[in-house]
């Protein structure tokens, strides 16, 4: 059964500028460098497509940061398989959906984190997590990247977890949206 958190629906229409990329797991081993390179490319591409009046430098930075955070999580926690990236821009509204496979234990742990993040004010929780991480250098999995996106970039984020009965893993789709003024 699919479990959904946050804003997990795409809203851009059929006239939106779209781009789909697959980061193939084989024969290339996915790494952090792929996240930055891919995010920078997509940030450049979509910033140039923004509606008139949108600051392209800001759009490029915001899209790149958003995608890099989500792609890093996808690479870090993926359980085999490719990473699928779909992005669209409709006027001043950017959306992305990143899909990857994770194992059940990771899915359960991430869902616990999402329940906590979505139940609180992201700005307050971000400050708490920064302070906690400063005192505990071994801390990880605190959601700082997601909280920064929600608090500082006003990103709308959502997640869909769909179990795959054939292999015991879970398909995770992360949806993220930014609106530029």
Image (cartoon, rainbow, N blue to C red):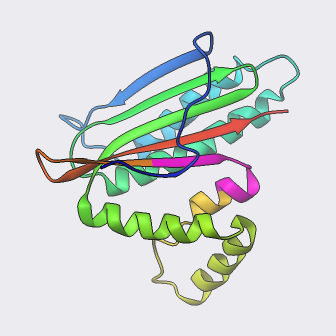
Q: Is residue 131 magenta?
A: no
Is 117 above or below relative to 161?
A: below
Is 110 above or below relative to 178?
A: below
Q: Position of residue 100 (x, y in %)?
A: 33, 43
Q: Quadrant of the C terminus?
A: top right
Q: Residue furthest right?
A: 53
Q: Position of residue 104 (x, y in %)?
A: 25, 61
Pick the front one: 1 or 31: 1
Q: Residue furthest top?
A: 15
Q: Residue furthest left?
A: 166
Q: Position of residue 81 (x, y in %)?
A: 22, 40
Pick the front one: 164 or 21: 164
Which residue is at 73% across, 49% downward? 153
**Displayed quadrant of residue 82:** top left
Q: Is residue 150 magenta?
A: yes
Pick the front one: 181 or 121: 121
Which residue is at 55% across, 72% downward? 116
Relative side of 19 to 7, left or right: left
Relative side of 180 to 142, left or right: right
Q: Which residues are magenta?
A: 149-159
Q: Residue furthest front?
A: 1
Pick the front one: 4 or 25: 4
Which residue is at 47% across, 28% downward? 86
Is 121 above or below relative to 162?
A: below
Q: Position of residue 119 (x, y in %)?
A: 62, 69
Relative side of 154 to 103, left or right: right
Question: How many dots with numbers?
Answer: 0
């Amino acid at each position: 059964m699919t479990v959904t958190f946050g804003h997990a629906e795409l809203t851009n229409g059929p006239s939106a500028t779209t781009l789909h990329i697959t980061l193939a797991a084989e024969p290339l081993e996915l790494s952090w460098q792929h996240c930055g390179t891919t995010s920078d490319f997509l940030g450049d591409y979509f910033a140039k497509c923004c509606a008139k009046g949108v600051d392209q430098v800001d759009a490029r930075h915001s899209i790149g940061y958003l995608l890099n955070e989500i792609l890093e999580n996808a690479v870090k926690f993926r359980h085999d398989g490719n990473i699928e990236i779909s992005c669209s821009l409709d006027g001043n509204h950017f959306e992305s959906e990143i899909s990857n496979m994770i194992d059940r234990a990771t899915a359960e742990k991430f869902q616990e984190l999402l329940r906590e993040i979505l139940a609180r004010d992201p700005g307050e929780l971000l400050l708490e997590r920064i302070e906690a991480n400063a005192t505990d250098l071994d801390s990880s999995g605190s959601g700082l990247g997601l909280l920064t996106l929600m608090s500082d970039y006003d990103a709308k984020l959502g997640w869909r977890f769909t179990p795959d009965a054939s292999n015991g893993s879970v398909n995770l789709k992360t949806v993220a949206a930014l609106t530029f003024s």
